[in-house]
Amino acid sequence: MEKRVTFASWTIGILFAVPQLLLIFTFFYWPAGQAVYWSLTLQQPWGGGNIWVGLDNFRSILANADYWNSITASLVFAGISTGLAMFIALVLAALTDRQLAGSRLYRVVLIWPYGIAAPALAMAFRFILAPEAGFLAVVNKGWPGFWDPGLDGADAMASIIIAFSWKYVGYNFIFFLAAFQAIPRSLIEAAAMDGSGVIRRFWDIQFPLITPTIFFLLVINITESFQDSFGIVDIMTSGGPANATNLMVYKIYSDGFKGLDYSGAAAQSIILMVLIVLLTIVQFRFIERRVHYR
Amino acid sequence: MASIAIRDVKKNYAKTQVVHGVDLDFASGEFVVILGPSGCGKSTLLRMIAGLEEISGGTIAIDGTVVNKLEPRQRGCAMVFQNYALYPHMSVAQNIGYSLKVAGVPAGERNQRIQAVARMLELEHLLERKPMALSGGQRQRVAMGRAMIREPKVFLFDEPLSNLDAKLRVQMRSEIRKLHRRLNATSVFVTHDQVEAMTLADRLVVMNGGRVEQVGTPGEIYTRPASRFVATFVGAPAMNILEGTVERDGLSLLGGSRRLATARVGLPVGTKVAMGIRPEAVRLVAPETAGALKATVDLVEELGAGRVIYVDLDGAPFSVMTSEAVHPEPGSTVGLKISPDDMHFFSSETGTRLDVFKASVPEPAL
């Protein structure tokens, strides 16, 4: 049976699509087109015309060691925070699915972090992870200097990873739980009858059946870790210390609006966009193959 | 091969009790069918045997070992689920062989056994397929193969045929019966379909409202139902029940509007009874026949080999099944002849069967 909606006249179809197309054009294609244009010119900081420079902006960015440092930091951040947010959410969802004590509480409480704006939660984590008064202040008492995100680049990176993961654990959890609950109970029971224990059942039955969700969340988490990290970095570390947490998205902002290098920032945003697109393509090409769609 | 002993088994969910103290014994190699309407606790009982449901009270023993606290895998049972519960991401061969893989059977032996089971179930050409690409009957056979391959002591079937169409159901029914004859493992089969129950069972357990109503061979259940519930639940069309009072020389039925002359009831005069008569035991006669009940025909259902005639007995519905070539017109009057031998009596209050004095009463001439 034909499941698509069909229209007698093609103009009606176009009319239905127009509002959405208008939105996408206004908020994506137009700014993206502008960014491409700016990245190929040299903009004057206080306005008043520009000079066409071709790919010079890209050449100078890619020749800059600071920029490569920023790419590395972004990849480290994306890798660890995605892994952490997904792993914790998966464990929590698997436990909740087994209806362990307190599972109803998890379900309600865990979606809240996603509703909190990144700068607000970053502010909270700045206090929580403050070396002189936060949770780790106790450790610092025993080992002075053990934890100091203001001085140690690794500590600063850990801080923003913790804050970001905390936000996305809730988001991932909801999807994982929905995926687990979509697995028919009888499959788990059949596996139990086949002699499979809890852990084995998880790996043999549940895990393969939630791979579509894992894949979806992987794409979303990686993409968001490149983009949604801005507020957290801005409030918690401002890219420091010594550029250790100067993620690509933050560098665009600081180079453009603090350094007033609009053209360089525009070029960086193009590179970031291309990088995300490439990563997504890679994921679809190489990881999606191992996904079992039902 | 294993015997199963169920002793005073109960099941509660929070505050509601769904199984009220069931006692049953299944002999080794027996094919037992548990029959009952939905919600009677039959599936719960099966799942308690399997270990998928905790036992709230009483004990279940398999081969003399109490299994209450054992995990499903330690009980030696295999189960076929209503919706088959095949692993959608595994091929047929992987589905069938999963339990062996879990048990650590080496790949070579595993494949041999998968092949052997597949041959028995005629699944050899489907081994590489995913369950999605199978028909209902094939999925059913894979589910059976998955249960068989472990050579379990006990087979549990949870309404395995209810998702199949009528023709396939009949076919699978006989296949299950044949398999049982071959493997001879103790089998417990849960169903709400009485035809399935009658045809498959060595012994039939009829359950209602979390209690066992009757245990017996299909023949016993049909000819001597222990309660009004069993009487009306087993047999199609259902047994007719007419409320009445025992009198000295017969029965007063339907609040006294009808009388049935028979002295063979063998119950104290004045006893309130529910008189049961199977539709196939009623004979259609001319309305004027002596001792016959007069009734108006409502509807005739043609079954090919016979027909069911629904009649109206002073407002009480009543059915007659006959293989004779009679076709009474709706609205016409017919006579119903009921032999005292075919009557069943149940207590009006408790619904239990009443026939204590039957043998001692001499047969009267009707």
Image (spheres, rainbow, N blue to C red):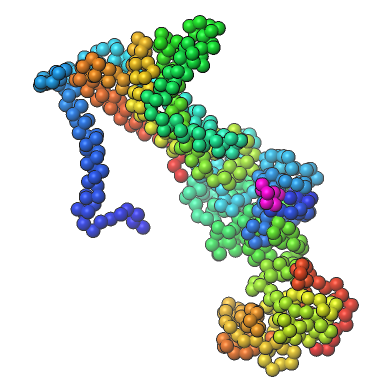
Residue B278 among those drawn in magenta: no
Task: Report the side of A243 relative to B303 (left or right).
Answer: left
Residue most extreme to the right: B360
Residue drawn at x 74%, y 76% is B275
Residue drawn at x 66%, y 56% is B190
Q: Please identify the quarter of the rendering in which residue B362 is found.
A: bottom right
Q: Main structural element of the magenta stretch: helix, strand or loop?
A: strand
User: Is residue B206 at least partly visible in the picture?
Assistant: yes
Task: Report the side of A252 relative to A170 (left or right).
Answer: left
User: Is residue A286 at least partly visible in the picture?
Assistant: no
In the rendered image of this protein, does residue B317 appear above or below residue B134? below
Residue most extreme to the top: A144
Which of the image's four quarters has the N terminus of chain A?
Answer: bottom left
Expressed as whole percent of the image width and height from the top left, the position of residue B127 reads 53, 46
Front residue of A50 and B359: A50
Residue drawn at x 56%, y 48% is B85
Task: Report the side of A33 relative to B336 (left or right).
Answer: left
Q: Please identify the quarter of the rendering in which residue A2 is found.
A: bottom left
In the rendered image of this protein, does residue A97 appear above or below residue A256? below
Residue drawn at x 34%, y 23% is A230
Expressed as whole percent of the image width and height from the top left, the position of residue A53 reads 13, 19
Expressed as whole percent of the image width and height from the top left, the position of residue A13 reads 24, 52
Front residue of B239 and B244: B244
In the rendered image of this protein, does residue A233 appear above or below residue B152? above
Residue B16 among those drawn in magenta: yes
- Which stretch appears magenta? B11-17
In the rendered image of this protein, does residue B144 appear above or below residue A231? below
- Total marks in image: 0
Front residue of B99 and B292: B292
Expressed as whole percent of the image width and height from the top left, the position of residue B216 reads 77, 63
